[in-house]
Amino acid sequence: MADDPSPTLDTLLQEGRSFPPPPDFAARANCRDPEVYARAEADPEAWWASWAEKLQWDRPWDTICKWTPPRARWFLGGRLNASVQCLDRHVEAGHGTRTAFLWEGEPGDTRRLSYEEMLRETCRIANALKELGIGRGDRVTLYMPMVPELAMTVLACARIGAIFSVVFAGFSAASLRDRIQDQEARLLVTADGCWRRGRVLDLKAVADEAVAECPSVEKVLVLRRGQGVETASAGSARDVAWEEIVPRQAPECPPESMEAEDPLFILYTSGTTGKPKGIWHCTGGYMTGVYATSQLVFDLKPEEDVFWCTADIGWITGHSYIVFGPMANGVTQVMYEGAPNHPGPDRFWEIVEKYGVTVFYTAPTAIRAFMKWGDEHPAGHDLSSLRLLGTVGEPINPEAWIWYHQHIGGGRCPIVDTWWQTETGGIMITPLPGLTETVPGSATLPFPGVGAAVVDEAGKEVETGGGYLVLTRPWPHMLRGIWGDPERYEATYWKRFPGRYFPGDGARRDERGRFWILGRVDDVMNVSGHRLSTMEIESALVDHPAVAEAAVIGVHHELKGQAPVGFVILRQGFEPGEELAQELIQHVGRLIGGLARPERILFTPELPKTRSGKIMRRLLRDIAEGRVLGDVTTLADPGVLDQLARMARERESEEA
Ligand code: PRX
């Protein structure tokens, strides 16, 4: 492969044990029938339609799927509203008093909200949005903490047919601005603050800075969460206080009847260029996919389960597996606002014990952090309520898998390692917990009805061995496009292997047909389960007056999976040094957000380039990770390498 992330492969192959579903789990699982795979495979469209039928449609569809590669449209002619699936349906079925959310704020404040209450509050917010002039097709940007109002605002937008776009609250003003501008949002919903490790971050100040350059934004709706924090610019004419407009609204709001293919939301994710892509998802297919996968992968039983997905709603995981999938299934969930180690490293386990969490979904990076913090933290809590565990976001190393299995799952809980992306909308490769034998490090098999394969450079299928992961047929919850850039959609996902979707990941198939995801094969890195573009960080570095040229790579990191390292060529008159390195790191944080801050900056007089002038990132990664250098004959100036390798070694011994 062109850019083989091989360190992952080495670690993945070391654990050979396999774990069949525990018999007592399998006996009660939502999916117990191994024939499900063959049935879905025989007629994928009928399979997906059987799930769509379980939703509440205002008008049935005429056509299940229209596939004109690379565009798919599902459930054409059908009409429905996404918020109805998540709220009204359960209330009408007599489950209104069931708890929807057990919410825990970081400082320890708590709230319990039933489905009925969620519906009423969502309607109030929807009516407030209407009063602010928002209607069908308008874009609304959400920049909010993890509070129930975030889920409600998402649902309120869906209710009136407005297209929402959640921007993770850790993103910078510039990132927020770019996203608002790209979607030309008319309204921004934010809060006066956001708790993080005992401190209140002034979200409103960031929002103000962003909105100053966003002429499309007519109003900013501000929720109070900061508890008295002084905001830099409270009281602009554009601001509307939540408490002044929402509580006085009627608690009913008729849902807009949306076409199945109408956009539901836009969510930005990093690609291989400097500009994040606005991935947009539609209403009918997306709801079908997240409903089905939630029910089968997490085995959700609304009467019994307490589900906790630890993601933030600012990421796709929170959209699909906090808001839409689990709520469409009517299950009770935990939502937590803050950091996993605040006030102590056992905060998550305290929450699991307190609320009796039964199904728990988190990222490998978090698991590695828990391992490092010590076994005593989970051991100090009663975790016996847990019955199923899941992971997402990056390849899980077998050591972390085994630790998760033993120390969190008590050796009795199946683990579902779920592979998917912002673009796929929902889980694509995963065990079914009552059916699939799992092996640490493998996401195992495509979800029923999903077509996946591993292919070589030429696009030929590899039965056993490594190559590129592709998806071979359309699925209902697939992205419908990149907002405002239809050509980029085709070029990014469908050009590399015509007729097949290329997610950008490398994968291997073993002799049992299982998939092992090896990580990105493009210039995208995965830092703590978050996708970052090397180009985006490079642009941020070059934005600094001291920087002439920069190359960014993702290097292996014990906790984060990968971490960005920047190689920087300085402009004349600037001297390399620790102070400048720190300044550059902070600069990236300011421009993109804290999550993109490079781990290290290495100053260099040159960058290794091919004769055609392309930066050889693989070599930079070898240097930064201290590996033996491979083939360098395409290098324009091999002398550059010695110099770079020496600098990296010096740097390391300084740190040691
Ligand atoms: O590289 C894959 C990795 O995360 C990428 C998608 O990132 P994002 O769109 O931010 O969505 C993350 C949450 C769904 C993929 O291209 N990835 C995700 N899940 C796994 C994974 N890599 C290996 N194993 C997984 N289970």
Image: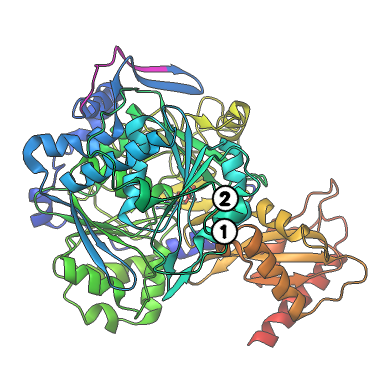
- Mark 2 vs 1: CB contact within 8 A: yes
> Is residue 587 rendered magenta in the image?
no
The residue identified by callout 1 is 206
The prevailing secondary structure element of the residues shown in magenta is loop
Measured Cα–Cα span from mark 2 to mark 1: 8 Å
Q: Quadrant of the C terminus?
A: bottom right
Residue holding disc 2:
176
Residue 307, picture quadrant = bottom left
> Residue 269 location in percent, x, y?
53, 46
Q: Quadrant of residue 325?
A: top left
Q: Is residue 602 left or right of residue 265?
A: right
Question: Which residue is depicted at the point 85% across and 64% down?
Answer: 606
Residue 651, above or below 420: below
Q: Is residue 455 above or below residue 518?
A: above
**Residue 407's mark?**
none
In this orientation, which residue lies closer to the viewer: 420 or 183? Answer: 183
Say whether disc 2 or disc 1 marks the residue closer to the N-terminus: 2
- Depth check: give the residue in front, 338 or 575: 338
